[in-house]
Amino acid sequence: MRIRPHRWLTPLVLALLTAFSATAALAAGNGKLQIHHMKIGQGDGTLLISPNGQTALFDDGVYTNCTYIKSYLQGLGIASVDYHFLSHYHADHLGCIDDLAAIGITVLTAGYDRGNSYSSATYTAYTTTLGAKRTTIAKGQTITLDAGSANPVTVTCVDLNGAGVYSVSGSDENAKSAVYKVSYGAFDEIVGGDLTGSTANGNDVETTIGPEVGDVEVYKVHHHGSAYSSNDNWLNAITPEVGIIMCGDGNTYGHPTAAALTRLHNHSVKTYWTETGAGATPDAAWDKVANGTVLVEVNLASNNYTVTAGASTDTYTIPTGGPPPTLNDSKVASAVTMTQGTITAGSVASLAASDNTKMTVTSAKTGTNYWTDWYGEAVLAHPPTSLTVTFEASYSVSRTQTLHVWNWSTSAWEQVNSATVSTTDAVKTWTTNTPANYVSPAGVVRFRALANTRTSSYTCRADQLKFDYTYLQGTITTRTPEEYARLVPPTYHEPYRNLTPQASVRTLTASAIGRKVALAWSTGAHDHMDGFNIYRENASGERVHVGGEAVMATTAEEITFGWTDENAPEGESVYWLGARSCAGPEGMIGPIRVTRAAAGPALETFAFAAAPNPAVRNVRFALTLPSAGAAELAIFDLSGRRVATPLKGALDAGTTHVDWALQRDDGGRVQPGVYFARIEVLGRTQVARVTVLQP
């Protein structure tokens, strides 16, 4: 049907209609696998459409901005999705499922997640929306789309909940992300939310899950391009060609980071970004920014897949089967342990090459006899498919030398050679094509040299201890959880953790409206918050959780939140606002006092402002009251400690100015940082954030 344009159909409107018409045809299934990585800001939301038209969502966007994902799915003609696969419970990954349901886009069959629970308003909305369709997925579980077709699409949960490396009860939600592998013919894409890979932070789950994933073509880059994800072990294991980075313009994390991009580029990964973000500058040779959805389409008939980002479309060939190639590596002893004897010359470094630079072990006496007994060890970077140990040594007098390898499965030394070795270097080798029992989960191999006893002293002169091995491309060695724990200093704080999320709150107002109490507050548009909790003190002064936030309005600069206490008690109530980021503790703002009358209209409103802000030498607060009343203006630091009280007393109606010279009540100047100015007057409370700069 041809559409006759009306005068009100501007070129922009016509372009949008054309785009919607083109994309709507995709929703019914076009014989290709379509994976739409949607531009939803600083979060994740990916739509899969199978060749026959079945649909699945992987995460569903940021709770503060659901407009794009709703309009995009509607533009595709999506009326429902068959499946929903959630990586983890942060609000930038499950934020819009209730908004989608409100416009009729519901989950038909099941919503899969990592199980367990979480405490946030978005999590509650997620579980309420899914209801009985919420299903805990298991490691290795596979869901099939287009079942019965010649080429079905499968979604497999590779691993989840920290993979045994990070505790499921730990505080880092990112480390527990479920990792899903989408497979269609020989094509694979891996989607793993915000999975972490930092050994220093004690949450390197990537290194363990990578070998379980194996080779893929496309990698939805973990954690929006964070420096603490996409480590080398992970990239070695999954060997992707393409990385999709989902990040938001102006984000406060600096995503995507140069560190992550450098690793991706070093592994020959071309990247496509939904937005430019606020971190590293894209490299035209490696990176393309869509400023919109990045679409991957897989065509098995032509054995290729395309990646469309904005006006650019690139085509990649799907590699045909066959096992990964076998590679070679070599390690020398990195440590030695003396069971009998003492190193009297050289060191473990002397074992690196056959060069007559030797490590001398002098025999020790036990009872009436002298002998030497020691072992060296190395750490292999990959699980070996074959292993050869080369040991070269001589003795000051001829000795019977017995060589052993440590068997980790039996926890015992296993003899592999015994022969006489004289004063001339002798090279001994041992090879196995089934090396699994001789390598620890962390890649450690041990080789022991024992010489027979004699009644007088002698020396063992070791020249080389080398471990040559083969391995399959894409495999790496993992460490045990205990070994990871030993790598983390006990006083370490994760650099990416937000220890003061309350500093993102710009303004806060609390007031009585009839028989209710309403709180409203704001943050910057790009402040990446996981949500807010509201607490009310009971008669004993304990903080009781009474609710979570609702999004009131968004602008280019600010997001306004609100919450209403429908059951506010009569008289004065004390509230606390708890602010949550995606990593770190909850930050509190309070006490917030509000007085609710037994009946009648809302209490009188007033105006409260602070300038200049940020401040260097002085802040002037302007307070405009509709009627006279007692007022108190107090300044608090981020820990909630009162540092100054610029005003306390009765005020007349009209505007009053109060100057604060950035001094504490004891007369000293406050330190640079963020502070909250709280005014209590006319039964209401308002809070304004004040930033103090170094003079």
Image (tube, rainbow, N blue to C red):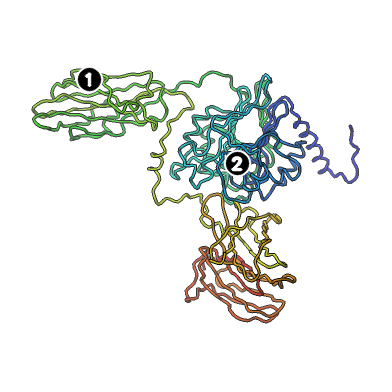
Q: Quadrant of residue 626?
A: bottom right
The local secondary structure at tag 2 comes to loop
Judge whether residue 188 can be spotted in this image.
yes
Residue 426 - label: 1
The picture places residue 262, in percent across and down from the top left corner, at: 52, 39
Q: Residue type at mark 2?
A: Pro
Q: Quadrant of residue 296?
A: top right
Q: Residues within 10 Å of mark 1 (few under 14, many from 20)?
A: some
Looking at the image, residue 109 sits to the left or right of residue 230; the answer is right
Mark 2 nearby-residue class (10 Å; few <14, some 14–19, many ≥20): some
Task: Depth check: give the residue in front, 306 or 502.
Answer: 502
In front: 56, or 169? 169
Q: Amino acid at mark 1?
A: Ala
Q: State the SS at label 1.
A: strand
Q: Where in the figure is residue 157, as x and y percent of width and height?
A: 57, 32
Q: Give above or below for 396 relative to 92.
A: above
3D distance between C-alphas at marks 2 and 1: 56 Å
- Whether the residues at callouts 2 and 1 have beta carbons within 8 Å, the answer is no
Tell us which disc is closer to us: 2 or 1.
1
Residue at the (54%, 43%) spot, across then down: 174
Label of residue 282 in the image: 2
Q: Quadrant of the N terminus?
A: top right
Q: Is residue 273 above or below residue 521?
A: above
Residue drawn at 26 percent across, 31 percent down:
350
Q: Position of residue 23 (x, y in %)?
A: 76, 34
Q: Position of residue 404 (x, y in %)?
A: 26, 23
Residue 285 seen by the camera: no
